[in-house]
Image (spheres, grey):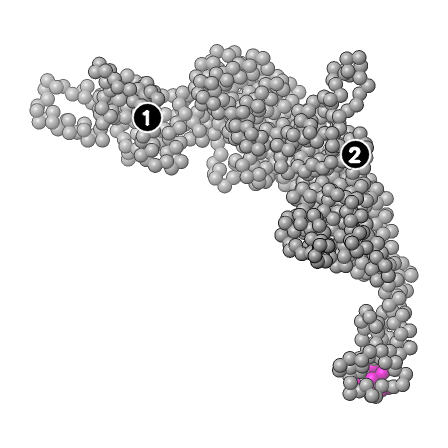
């Protein structure tokens, strides 16, 4: 192997689990197995270095385009080790090279990869070690049941730690944190938590930690320092927190309520975050997302947020002015992180300065703030006047992108630099004057003074004029059409000019580093100011959302039920198809009705009602106002949801298994202060099995747990159960049924069975989306299928099969033969005499036929056959026959 390839092999050995970007001139090259993998993942050409048996697979990318390729690799869960040239390649011998940084999914700083309003967390966890007692446990918990979590965002400096007491709680907390990367000691790679996390979210990437640390926070800092090759001055002091400080949200609840993305398409639009995130700054957006997945459980803290929002709502001018000023605020957290990790440039310094210039104006706007959060945020804002003054003096207003180009440092900041700039300017002027002087002295009009990197400055004469060159010209190079010369005077000024420019570049980089160092020295103050700005932005976001959507301030109580007047679904009412959203009330009382059994048709609004109630509670406890006329919320410790019908092929679980696991989690962890949302539990199995399970679950929630519960179901048999339970009540979705023939002919509103028997030909249903007291024993499934566009013949057949099923004349899909005494009326006569005389209800088609049959039957009863002539009888039969069609 060549010395360079031996160097490559030695460096690659240091980082076997990463794709090595090996700098060769203007390219990053990859060799051997890295080249094969990178060419496949990046879709770039695979070539070879050398030939024959010593052939080495190779591929490469231009160094200036590396970020795009690195981004692709990290998004695919790969590590990339950047190996740079550390010595001058023009010097003799092999260039010194080494890894300067390792980029992973959880440590990237690339703005093209990072989402502005989303943290990019790197996480680790360890098993806590205890001084075990005789029975091997401490406080009833064994070491294997207790875990420490540490996670950080290297792009912002956030660093948090917590402890959990079970593997399931560990999984729940990690899913709420939603890290981009998890780094673990090899012994934990086969743990239950990793197995569950791998099944649940393909967007988390796992890497093994090779060090000897056993403490979570030490593993994290060691891993970050080894990848960043930096002491991480921006990494904040660890911030321990208790999981109990927030309402725990399990994976099912976050997904089912679509808090941060939609359930089906994983999109922001259509989620709760899409509605409530009106934050202007990236820092505010990240904090708001943090609030959304961590509802508070302390009434004092919640009320403090509501007070701050209310103050801005009451002062619309203040709100608008604050939002205007915030629009000039850059992402200070990520900006100073780049600077502290030596990845920032002079534009970052100018951006920081311009952001700091807005701080005094924001402080002035909040000068009369009365709400505690608003006034405390104002007090936390640091104008850092001395830093603003330094950057203003040192850096030009519009510096170049690269710090190697020069032109960053302002005139008047450094005397030595100013002198060098003067020399450079005067030297260049001298060169221009020299050309004019030589033209005059030699009389050669096309004489040129030029420059290239090989020869420096030189005088160029055409072939025809070369013989006229003075003796003082020293021939340097002969070309086809020209001759190049130098003079002692020209070389003297060349040395002066070029020496000055080299010194300018080096001095500018040193001065830039000094200013950057001044920023790093104040990084704690900057981060504190950034947090205050983020808080102000979130409060403004809650306020503007409440104003524009007509939200109310909820009343928060430590104990009590949930009372919502005219509540609305915050997302559904914003969608294009929701032209007129129908509000609904909710009352749940600890000592009164606390379990509502809700029946009614599909598409009638049951699921929307369930979700909106849960979302209103959650919004209230994150500090937001809520979509309702009024709301009184007794603090909820957990929100549990079991909604939707989805299997999980990745986990090898059927729809019914998913239902049962989510329900089991609810029954195991809900308390009397929890809010439980159940939608169609048990439908993933046979009717009787599902109904039995739903029945038992209802009783358990009512009798054993006693929590606030909303249970939507199509098992109408449960209506009788709710009537028997002292703290349960039946509710239903209002539906208007219509038979139309030149107008409305029959109507039922879902809560009564009153009908007008008038002749008609078309039947339909109208969803009223209103939740009313009382249960209904119909699901209107066939009508919904009709609305969905099923062919008419399929709908008609479904009506007939439903009649057969309900009358018990179907067995294993085949009609039974009835004896003569019970034989059914022929199908073609059903519209006249189908169950109408018995007053029984059934499918919509049966009821339609019943209405017509009742009308004809009643008209027949009114006919006096004793006085009817034969002709009148025939006419009457023809009339009735026409009506029966």
Q: In which quarter of the image is the C terminus?
A: top left
* Mark 2, other Cα within 10 Å: few <14 / some 14–19 / many ≥20: many
Q: Is mark 1 on a helix, strand or loop?
A: helix
* 442 in magenta: yes
Which numbered circle lies on residue 801? 1
**Viewer-nearest of discs 2 and 1:** 2
Q: Quadrant of residue 556?
A: top right
Q: Where is residue 782 in the image (x, y as percent from the top left)?
A: 37, 29
Q: Which residue is painted at 59% across and 37% down in the image?
A: 261
Side (left or right) of 846 relative to 424: left
Q: Which residue is painted at 78% across and 82% down in the image?
A: 482
Identify the main secondary structure in magenta.
Answer: helix
* 247 in magenta: no
**864 or 164: which is nearer to us?**
164
Instruction: Tell which circle, 2 or 1, labels the residue nearer the N-terminal end.
Output: 2
The CA distance from mark 2 to mark 1 is 66 Å
Q: Which residue is painted at 84% across and 42% down in the image?
A: 231
Q: Residue furthest front?
A: 53
Side (left or right) of 127 relative to 257: right
Which stretch did the figure color magenta?
A: 436-445
Q: Position of residue 831 (x, y in %)?
A: 25, 26
In the picture of the structure, the residue carrying the numbered disc 2 is 219
Q: Is residue 581 visible?
A: yes
Q: Is residue 598 visible?
A: no
């Amino acid at each position: 192997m060549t010395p360079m390839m031996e160097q490559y092999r030695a460096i690659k050995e240091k980082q076997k689990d990463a794709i090595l970007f090996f700098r060769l001139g203007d390219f990053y090259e990859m060799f051997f197995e890295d080249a094969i993998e990178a060419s496949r993942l990046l879709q770039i050409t695979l070539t070879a270095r050398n030939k024959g048996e010593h052939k080495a697979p190779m591929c490469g990318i231009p160094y200036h385009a590396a970020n795009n390729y690195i981004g692709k690799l990290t998004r695919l869960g790969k590590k990339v080790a950047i190996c740079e040239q550390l010595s001058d390649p023009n010097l003799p011998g092999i260039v010194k090279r080494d890894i300067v940084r390792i980029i992973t999914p959880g440590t990237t700083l690339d703005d093209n990869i990072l989402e502005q309003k989303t943290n990019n967390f790197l996480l680790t966890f360890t098993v806590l070690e205890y001084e075990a007692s005789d029975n091997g446990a401490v406080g009833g918990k064994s070491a294997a049941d207790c875990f420490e979590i540490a996670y950080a965002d290297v792009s912002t400096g956030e660093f948090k730690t917590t402890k959990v007491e079970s593997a399931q709680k560990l999984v729940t907390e990690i899913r709420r944190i939603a890290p981009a990367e998890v780094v673990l000691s090899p012994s934990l790679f086969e743990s239950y938590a990793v197995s569950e996390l791998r099944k649940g979210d393909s967007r988390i990437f796992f890497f093994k930690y090779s060090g000897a640390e056993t403490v979570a926070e030490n593993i994290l800092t060691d891993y970050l320092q080894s990848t960043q090759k930096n002491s991480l001055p921006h990494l904040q002091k660890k911030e321990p927190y208790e999981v109990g400080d927030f309402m725990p949200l399990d994976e099912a609840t976050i997904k089912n309520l679509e808090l941060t993305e939609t359930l089906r398409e994983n999109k922001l639009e259509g989620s709760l975050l899409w509605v409530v995130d009106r934050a202007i700054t990236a820092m505010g957006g990240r904090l708001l997302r943090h609030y959304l997945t961590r509802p508070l459980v302390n009434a004092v803290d919640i009320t403090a947020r509501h007070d701050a929002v209310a103050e801005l709502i009451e002062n619309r001018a203040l709100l608008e002015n604050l939002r205007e000023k915030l629009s000039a605020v850059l992402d200070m957290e990520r900006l100073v992180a780049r600077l502290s990790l030596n990845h920032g440039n002079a534009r970052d310094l100018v951006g920081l300065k311009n952001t700091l210039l807005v701080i005094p104006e924001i402080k002035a706007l909040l000068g009369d703030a009365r709400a505690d959060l608003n006034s405390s945020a104002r007090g936390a804002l640091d104008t850092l006047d001395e830093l603003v003054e330094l950057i203003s003096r040192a850096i030009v207003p519009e510096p170049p992108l690269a710090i190697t180009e020069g032109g960053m440092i302002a005139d008047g900041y450094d005397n030595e630099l100013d002198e060098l700039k003067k020399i450079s300017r005067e030297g260049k002027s001298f060169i221009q004057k020299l050309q004019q002087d030589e033209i005059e002295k030699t009389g050669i009009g096309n004489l040129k003074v030029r420059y290239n990197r090989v020869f420096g400055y030189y005088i160029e004469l055409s072939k025809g004029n070369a013989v006229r060159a003075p003796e003082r010209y020293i021939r340097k190079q002969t070309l086809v059409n020209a001759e190049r010369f130098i003079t002692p005077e020209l070389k003297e000024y060349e040395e002066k000019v070029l020496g000055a420019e080299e010194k300018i570049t080096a001095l500018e980089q040193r001065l830039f580093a000094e200013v950057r160092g001044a920023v790093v020295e104040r990084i704690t103050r900057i981060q504190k100011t950034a947090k205050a700005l983020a808080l102000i932005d979130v409060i403004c976001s809650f306020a503007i959302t409440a104003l524009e959507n007509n939200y109310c301030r909820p009343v928060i109580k430590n104990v009590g039920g949930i009372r919502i007047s005219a509540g609305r679904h915050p997302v559904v009412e914003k969608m294009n198809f929701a032209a007129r959203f129908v509000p609904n009330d909710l009352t749940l009382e600890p000592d009164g009705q606390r379990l509502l059994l809700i029946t009614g048709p599909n598409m009638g609004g049951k699921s929307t009602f369930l979700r909106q109630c849960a979302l209103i509670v959650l919004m209230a406890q994150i500090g937001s106002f809520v979509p309702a006329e009024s709301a009184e919320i007794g603090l909820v410790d957990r929100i549990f949801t079991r909604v939707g019908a989805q299997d999980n092929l990745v986990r090898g679980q059927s729809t019914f298994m998913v239902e049962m696991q989510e329900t089991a989690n609810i029954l195991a962890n809900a308390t009397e202060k929890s809010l439980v949302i159940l939608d169609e539990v048990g439908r993933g199995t046979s009717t009787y099995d599902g109904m039995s399970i739903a029945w038992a679950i209802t009783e358990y929630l009512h009798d054993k747990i006693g929590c606030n519960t909303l249970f939507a179901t199509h098992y109408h048999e449960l209506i009788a159960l709710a009537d028997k339970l002292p703290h349960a009540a039946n509710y239903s979705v209002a539906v208007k049924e219509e038979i139309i023939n030149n107008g409305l002919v029959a109507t039922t509103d879902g809560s009564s069975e009153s009908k007008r028997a008038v002749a008609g030909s078309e039947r339909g249903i109208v969803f009223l989306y209103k939740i009313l007291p009382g249960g209904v024993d119909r699901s209107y499934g066939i009508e919904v299928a009709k609305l969905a566009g099923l062919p008419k013949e399929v709908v008609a057949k479904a009506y007939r099969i439903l009649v057969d099923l309900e009358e018990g004349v179907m067995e294993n899909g085949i009609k039974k033969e009835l004896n003569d005494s019970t034989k059914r009326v022929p199908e073609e006569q059903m519209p006249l005499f189908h169950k109408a005389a018995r007053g029984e209800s059934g499918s919509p088609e049966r009821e339609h036929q019943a209405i017509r049959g009742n009308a004809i039957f009643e008209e027949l009863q009114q006919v006096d056959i004793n006085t009817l002539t034969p002709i009148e009888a025939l006419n009457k039969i023809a009339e009735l026959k026409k009506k029966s069609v």
